[in-house]
Image (cartoon, grey):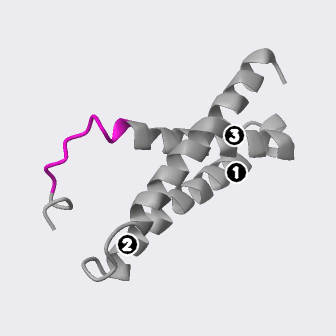
Amino acid sequence: MSDLEIFAFIASVFSTLKGWLTWYGDIASVNRLRVPIQERFVLLAAPLVCLVLIQITLTRLAATTVRSDALYISFYLLVGAGWLGGWCFLRIFLQRDSWWSER
């Protein structure tokens, strides 16, 4: 792995931990009586579904060197998880007046 990949790995670890803990912590703190589990399940499953789609893409459509190396697949899955976690940081800049926040 090059120096840039090592930096991306470290940044992805921090972004993944912070973002995913924030994401699932916010979902866990929702009043269970006010929002039924069926509506929260979509939010619980969405990041995991995204990771599955990333893994399918990596194992089927990536370059041969990536498809044949479990380390690269793990690395790119972690980078993908970091990008997903990074969206939690961007939530503060997104508009809050949506149909979901009015519920």
Camera-near label (2 vs 1) is 2
Give the mark nearest the N terminus, 2 or 1. Answer: 2
Give the mark nearest the N terminus, 3 or 2. Answer: 2
Q: Which mark is residue 40?
A: 2
Badge 3 is on which residue?
76
Gap between marks 2 and 1 measured at Cα? 31 Å
Look at the numbered disc 3 and give the secondary structure of its residue. Answer: helix
- Give the magenta part as a residue range: 90-98
**Left or right for 11, reference 35:** right
The type of residue carrying mark 3 is: Tyr
Badge 1 is on which residue?
60
Q: Position of residue 49 (x, y in %)?
A: 53, 62
User: Mark 3 Cα within 10 Å, few/some/many (few <14, many 20+)?
Assistant: many
**Left or right for 23, reference 100:** right
The type of residue carrying mark 1 is: Arg
The type of residue carrying mark 2 is: Arg
Q: Position of residue 102 (x, y in %)?
A: 13, 62
Gap between marks 1 and 3 measured at Cα? 14 Å
